[in-house]
Amino acid sequence: MWDAGVWDKENNILSIKWSGRVTPDEVAAANEKLQQILQDLAPKSFDVVVEMENLMAFSPETQEAIVEHQRWLLEEGMRYAAVVVDKATAKMQLKRTAKESGHSNEFHFDTIDEAIEFLKNK
């Protein structure tokens, strides 16, 4: 499952939520929604808060889609990603996808409040 939206319009913070077993088709659908949001907001740059809830390990195909998803977000102007992750295996996968996509501004948090505070005060 996934969801995407605007967390804080004033501060250009988008939100993405991944949960359960994410498929490449879900990553593509999330990208379509994010593209529409970016067209509507037209920010020069933006940040993303990512919630990963009960996430199952990514399949190799989903892992590849997430890497491309991160690359695309960087090309669109993403500065920072604050990721709330509850499992060590998910955190390991995220570190690998960030490295593969060239995303060096991804930070992990235990709670959504910590993640949002980081993005608002960076």
Image (cartoon, rainbow, N blue to C red):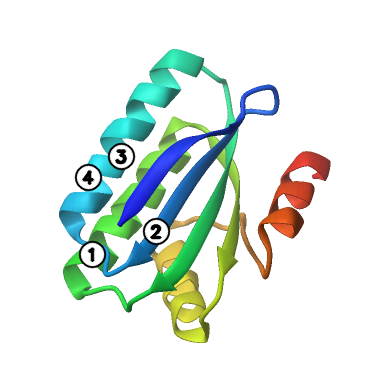
What separation in Å lies between label 1 and label 4 (alpha carbons)?
Answer: 10 Å
Given this view, does label 2 or label 4 mark the residue nearer the observer?
2
Mark 4, Cα crowd under 10 Å, few <14 / some 14-19 / many 20+, is some
Q: Quadrant of residue 56?
A: bottom left
Q: Quadrant of residue 1?
A: bottom left
Circle nearer the N terminus (2, 3): 2
Amino acid, disc 4:
Ala
Mark linked to residue 28: 4
Amino acid, disc 3:
Asn
* Residue 117 located left or right of residue 18: right
Relative to 23, say whether 16 is above or below. above
Mark linked to residue 62: 1
Please state the horizontal and vertical placement of residue 108, each as a whole percent of the image: 63, 66
Residue position marked by numbered label 3 in the rendering: 31
Mark 1, Cα crowd under 10 Å, few <14 / some 14-19 / many 20+, is some
Amino acid, disc 1:
Thr
Please state the horizontal and vertical placement of residue 27, each as a whole percent of the image: 26, 51
What separation in Å lies between label 3 and label 1 (alpha carbons)?
Answer: 13 Å
